[in-house]
Image: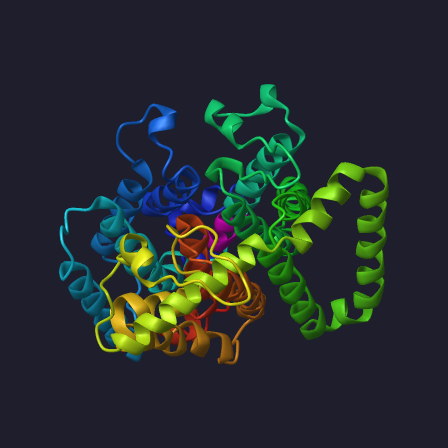
Amino acid sequence: MSASVLATTTPDRTSLPSIGPREPAYVWLFLAGLVLTVFNGHTEDLGIPVPLDRALLALAVLLWLLDPARERLRMRAFYAVAAATILWTTLSWMSTWPITDTSTAFALLDRIIVPLAMFPLGAAIFATSHRRELLLRTMALIATYVGFSGLMQYLGVQSLLFPRYLVAGISQGANSRPGGPWLAPEPLGMVSVLAIFMAGLLVHVSNHRLWRVVGAIGVISGLVGTLVCLTRSSWLSAILGGLVIGLLVPRLRRWLPMIIIGLLGVGTLLLVVFPEFRDALVTRLFTERSVFDRQNTNDAALQIIQMLPLFGIGWGQFIVQNVLWVRQADDYPVTTVTIEIHNVFLSRAAETGVLGALLWILCFATGPLLGLLAKPNSVWARHWKLVGLAAFFVWVVPSLTSPNPYVLPNYLVWLVWGIAARGILIDLPRRSTNA
């Protein structure tokens, strides 16, 4: 075990070199909360009356706050901007009636408050290489499960789906898409794409052969989940993330042409061997309905911004008021009306006003963006910066093309950004290359 690892542990913990340092309870509770977030929104289908994921995450944060040995966060402009964003959005929500609507309350929690909190928590909780590897291991296991679930749903194999509610996500017909444990294809794709890069990092950094194998399985499962979700935004984010990392890493850059040719060859073989998948892929590539949905809701959002630029219509209110704003266009039809705005930035501006949208953008600019632009001060920091760049595409492409309301993908993206920005969020000791 390296001296930097030993420096982060107490003497009695050094007797367990085979399994790494013993971690505090809040690390395990936090990881358990992330795992259970896979089933967020379906706890009743599991026979659990109360969602446990948020409770475990909250308990983990409380124990971390009570830990006298925890690292102290630097003061950053991000915290002021994040506080202003939460306050402004909360006031926007309170301006609507009734505020007892649980859907808008949980949306505020899961789309604004918790993702912003995940940014500093990523830097503070995953403070050592061992903890960061535990997160990578967890992600590889999640990828294996969701990729397998998505594949079984696509193939229609009911007997291998667990929990049983996943049977409802079995793909039927050319326009149907598997959704894994979320029963929705986009979060399956987002988590799968992010897992490709995080599980790949596990293969690269782990000293344990077993976990390198698990990481490789996670990469393969992530690729499978990305393919079978049949979601164009996930395909685009995977391509962009892969190209950027391939160009930035010298070792990968030399092999990038061969990797592209190999992937194209495998893709062509899949299309030839599995004509059903080819037909579904072609259908999905050229479908126009979702494009019309996007145009209709985005045009409605622009009308709202023009008429109510300061305060908007209120947090979570477009789904209620959209019939008042959607209009028939001259060159494309009105499709589904009772859906959210298919652009997160337009949605923020339409519901919370232009100021609400600017604050949301500033949260990214003063936090994750600065972290990604900062010069990495260690090898591990360079690794996580690359994963953070991939996470950017996983986040921004769906945010431009959908409501992106999904809990786990948003949590993970901001968590990864926090780890990548650890160098600017926490005063790091110069002697340690592990922190």
Q: Is residue 84 above or below residue 39?
A: below
Q: Is residue 160 above or below residue 245?
A: above
- In this view, the residue in front, 49 or 230, is 230
Q: Give the left or right position of residue 125, taking residue 195 as reference.
A: left
As drawn, the residue found furthest toward the top would be 159
- Colour mapping used in the image: rainbow
At a point 42% along the width and 50% down the height, the residue shown is: 406
Q: Looking at the image, is 126 positioned above or below residue 32?
A: below
Report x, y in % for residue 289. 56, 53
Q: Is residue 196 visible?
A: yes
**Magenta residues?**
130-136
Q: Quadrant of residue 350?
A: bottom left
Which of the pair 237/74 is nearer the observer? 237
- Front residue (pair 169, 20): 169
The stretch drawn in magenta includes residue 73:
no
Spot occupied by residue 362 in the image (x, y as percentages of width and height): 35, 77
Pick the front one: 19 or 66: 66
At 80% from the left edge and 39% from the top edge, which residue is drawn? 275
The answer, for residue 1, to whether it is visible in the render is no
Residue 300 position, x and y percent, is: 38, 66
